[in-house]
Image: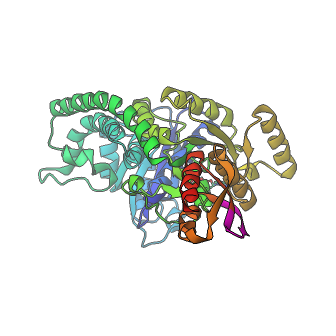
């Protein structure tokens, strides 16, 4: 996901209505999550507008006064009551979007867009865009397209109204992809397309399972994937573990994206780390299927790093949901390392020690750490490497002096722990895969 953080920053404001049934804590948590999601899309959120209302009316999500406040803010006009909002961001910044923390109706969106003068994206659209960017397999792409079509269908007519007789296309994120190419389609065509995609998914399902097992066998790659809720620190850990921004130049992944990198410093075997689309606390139910299929790519990993924000009061529930969903997509069999991150965010050092002890007691195999502490990251790296080395064996190989041209190959195919010279040649103490080492041994013995 990190790779998609936009080349040129775009700016947005967030707006949300708090209804009486929603507690302050819930409301704040949802807003914080929306801001995280916005960041994932490359938006810089410059302000959050909130309002308490008993409900929404059918045409307007925000009240008239609030809409005017947002309009003035977005258009760099002074605030009405001199609250000083307009001065809180640079005058040359252009606000590209207003992000609304609910799924709003097409007409609510259209009205707000007309009034404020910039694109409106609701929570569902923000999430759909993230899935769209993260869906890599054909099945995931199809699933996300279904969700997008379902979402866009009722909005197309509103978009057409907004565009006016010239048929101007909506710009920006919301108008791209499924939206853009389907503006002319009527609802029947959308239904047909959805049905077609669903058939494709069924057909792909079988094929995909075969591909996955083949892919792993063939490549023999050591892959680990980071899974967990948005904001748990997956991308931060990914960066800390892989260090460089260098793309993995492996054919399998080169076409995908930069969310796959090599564990650094490199190990034997070389370990690939991949980031996945994060779990979302307030995931609209119509997006569940596309979320799961986007996450399914985590199944290609041999080890899952389940990252949990230890400082989040709701972490236990998140942990359960993650486990359940992983089971639903068939990932229960994939070995898993439970990583409690952000321990540095839990109060003072006494509180941190207490939390760590409690976590260790409850989840004996877990890692408790902070992605901000290099020692912790190094420790996690070692655990990952150990996992992939557990099937490796140690042995000694003898290479005659007359066959030193094989040194390079030896070093490339296993880890050399020690090397010593003997009268007839060099003896290497090595660690590697059993089969690899035995085939080397067989060849070296022919040399003497
Ligand atoms: N204090 C602290 N902050 C962290 C830690 N890990 C991540 N963060 C911060 O938490 C926020 C979310 O991290 P990110 O990696 O984007 O989470 P993701 O959504 O799981 O990819 C960022 O602001 C990070 O800088 C940690 O261990 N300690
Ligand atoms: Mg991330």
In the foreground, 58 or 401: 401
User: Is residue 199 on the magenta stretch?
Assistant: no
In the foreground, 283 or 49: 283
Locate residue 348 relative to residue 379 in the image: left or right.
Answer: right
Q: Which residue is drawn at 48% across and 30% down?
A: 329
User: Is residue 420 on the magenta stretch?
Assistant: yes
Q: Which residue is drawn at 46% across and 41% down?
A: 217
Locate residue 161 relative to residue 209 in the image: left or right.
Answer: left
Q: Residue at x 35, y 33 (%)?
A: 58
Locate residue 332 relative to residue 398 in the image: left or right.
Answer: left
Residue 186 rendering spot, x and y as whole percentages: 15, 35
Picture quadrant where residue 445 is located: bottom right
Residue 373 rendering spot, x and y as whole percentages: 73, 59
Locate residue 81 relative to residue 357 in the image: left or right.
Answer: left
From what the image shows, is residue 360 above or below residue 397?
above
- Is residue 102 at all visible to an observer of this figure? no
């Amino acid at each position: 996901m990190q790779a998609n953080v936009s080349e040129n920053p775009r700016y947005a404001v967030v707006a949300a209505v708090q209804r009486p049934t929603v507690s302050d804590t819930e409301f704040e948590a949802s807003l914080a999550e929306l801001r995280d999601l916005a960041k994932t899309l490359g938006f810089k959120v410059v302000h959050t507008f909130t309002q308490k209302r008993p409900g929404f009316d059918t045409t307007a999500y925000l009240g008239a006064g609030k809409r005017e406040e947002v309009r003035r803010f977005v258009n760099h006009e002074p605030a009405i009551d001199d609250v000083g909002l307009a001065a809180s961001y640079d005058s040359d910044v252009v606000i590209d979007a207003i992000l609304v923390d609910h799924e709003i109706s097409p007409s609510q969106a259209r009205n707000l867009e007309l009034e404020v003068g910039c694109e409106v994206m609701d929570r569902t659209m923000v999430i759909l865009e993230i899935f769209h960017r993260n869906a890599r397999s054909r099945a995931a792409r199809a699933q996300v397209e279904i969700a997008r079509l379902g979402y866009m269908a009722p909005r197309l007519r509103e978009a057409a109204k907004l565009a006016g007789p010239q048929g101007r296309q909506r710009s920006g994120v919301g108008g791209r992809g499924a939206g853009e190419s389907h503006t002319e389609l009527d609802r029947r065509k959308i239904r047909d397309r959805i049905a077609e995609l669903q058939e494709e998914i069924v057909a792909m399902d079988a094929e995909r399972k075969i591909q996955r097992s083949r892919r792993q066998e063939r490549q023999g790659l050591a892959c680990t994937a980071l899974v967990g809720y948005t904001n748990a620190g997956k991308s931060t850990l990914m960066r800390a573990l892989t260090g460089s921004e260098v793309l993995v130049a492996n054919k399998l992944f080169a076409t995908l994206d930069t969310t796959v990198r090599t564990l650094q410093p490199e190990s034997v075997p070389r370990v690939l780390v991949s980031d996945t689309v994060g779990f979302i606390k307030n995931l609209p139910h119509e997006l569940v299927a596309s979320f799961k299929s986007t996450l399914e790519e985590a199944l290609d990993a041999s080890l899952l790093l389940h990252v949990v924000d230890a400082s989040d009061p709701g972490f236990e529930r998140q942990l359960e949901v993650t486990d359940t969903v992983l089971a639903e997509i068939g990932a229960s069999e994939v070995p898993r390392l439970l990583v409690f991150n952000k321990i540095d965010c839990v109060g003072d050092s006494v509180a941190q020690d207490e939390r760590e002890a409690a976590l260790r007691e409850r989840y004996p195999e877990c890692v408790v750490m902070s992605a901000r502490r290099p020692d912790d990251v190094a420790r996690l790296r070692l655990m990952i490497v150990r996992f992939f080395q557990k099937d490796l064996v140690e042995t000694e190989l003898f290479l005659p002096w007359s066959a030193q041209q094989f040194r390079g190959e030896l070093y490339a195919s296993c880890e050399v722990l020690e090397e010593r010279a003997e009268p007839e040649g060099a003896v290497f103490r090595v660690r590697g895969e059993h089969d690899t080492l035995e085939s080397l041994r067989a060849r070296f013995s022919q040399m003497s």
